[in-house]
Amino acid sequence: MLKSRVCEAIGIRYPIFQGGMAWVSDGKLAAAVSNAGGLGIISAMNADENYVRGQIQLCRSLTDKPFGVNIMLMSPHVEAVAKLVVEEKVPVVTTGAGLPGKYMPAWIEAGIKVVPVVPSVAIARRVERSGATAVIAEGTESGGHIGELTTMALVPQVVDAVSIPVLAAGGIADGRGMAAAFMLGAEGVQCGTRFLSAYECGIHENYKQKVIAARDIDTQVTGRKLGHPVRALRNPFVNKFAEMERDPNVSEEELSAFGTGAVRKAAVDGDLQGGSFLAGQIAALVKKEQSAKEIVDDLMRETEEILSKAAERVFES
Ligand code: TUI
């Protein structure tokens, strides 16, 4: 049985978080992952506090296990959602796309375990000083909003810099990736892309099939010009965005307006032309639909098998 400080700190059976994904991670998916022994996470994305409250209630109606809410710090509703998680006494808050420092005292005071996503050593150190329970070191292989460093380079550097547990994210979708993360010093993982194909994931069937059909080279990063690089599966929307980004006559406002609503179009409408299908570089490893429990069980079985036989694999007897 794999041993991890993450399980003790969060109160979960397996050290696997399901990433908070905009228009993807709702109360139903989060409850399914938590019931499977991982940590399911509801995405607060750009939604208001009423939507997030509804998803928390839905999750609580489906599981009595710990779950999390991911707060996207660029959200226009961040202040209201930051208050809501305190009122609702949400067990775990993860954060993304910014520095959570100003909200952390109130969350910690309320007994919430705070686990920020960090793209660098300096930010990991800062959130540890602010009282984070653990950090998620997320490499640029991830889908959605990304940092610069790869998981392979970032994770061991963050592990050396902080004493709280580190979870690895970015490019992890099976037991090989999870075992490798543990070899880098991580004590848990966060997977997003792998859970896109879960039966309990309510995204449009076109999104699931696009992930299942993806090849290794099928993701592309756009949005660097706006200062918010985002990784998604290549399609007409991504091609057009990239073309507009290269055109010096297109203003940042026009670019930003073109991108607005595209993630919803992908996840809710399955709009293959106009949607932004956020997914990580590991999408090609996702080959079929499965239940959240099958995904968590596969990850754990593969990881334990690889790690327990690691020496046999590489040493001659
Ligand atoms: O947040 C994510 N992934 C996301 S958020 C999102 S919604 C969105 N859509 C378009 C543009 C921007 C956001 C879709 N996918 N992952 C966690 C993550 N956090 N990745 C990188 C960071 C991060 C970046 C900078 C965390 C802290 C940070 O601090 C530095 C600063 O200057 O704020």
Image: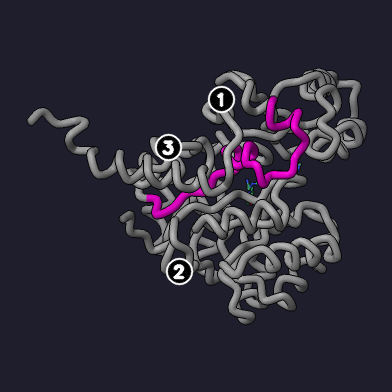
Query: Which residue is the site of mark 3?
Result: 177
Residue appearing at x 33%, y 54% in the figure: 2
Where 140 falls versus 80 (above or below)? above
Q: Residue furthest left?
A: 317
In this rendered view, identify the residue nearer to me: 58 or 84. Answer: 58
Query: Which residue is the site of mark 1?
Result: 284
**Circle 2 Cα neighbour tier, 10 Å, few/some/many (<14 / 14–19 / ≥20):** few
Q: Secondary structure at mark 1?
A: helix
| Image quadrant occupied by the N terminus | bottom left
Who comes first in sequence, dot 3 or dot 1? 3
**Circle 3 Cα neighbour tier, 10 Å, few/some/many (<14 / 14–19 / ≥20):** many
Q: Amino acid at mark 2?
A: Ala
Q: Residue 231 appears in which quarter of the rendering?
A: top right
Where 286 falls versus 121 (above or below)? above
In this rendered view, identify the residue nearer to me: 215 or 153. Answer: 215
- What residue span does the magenta drawing correspond to? 186-209
In this rendered view, identify the residue nearer to me: 275 or 256. Answer: 275
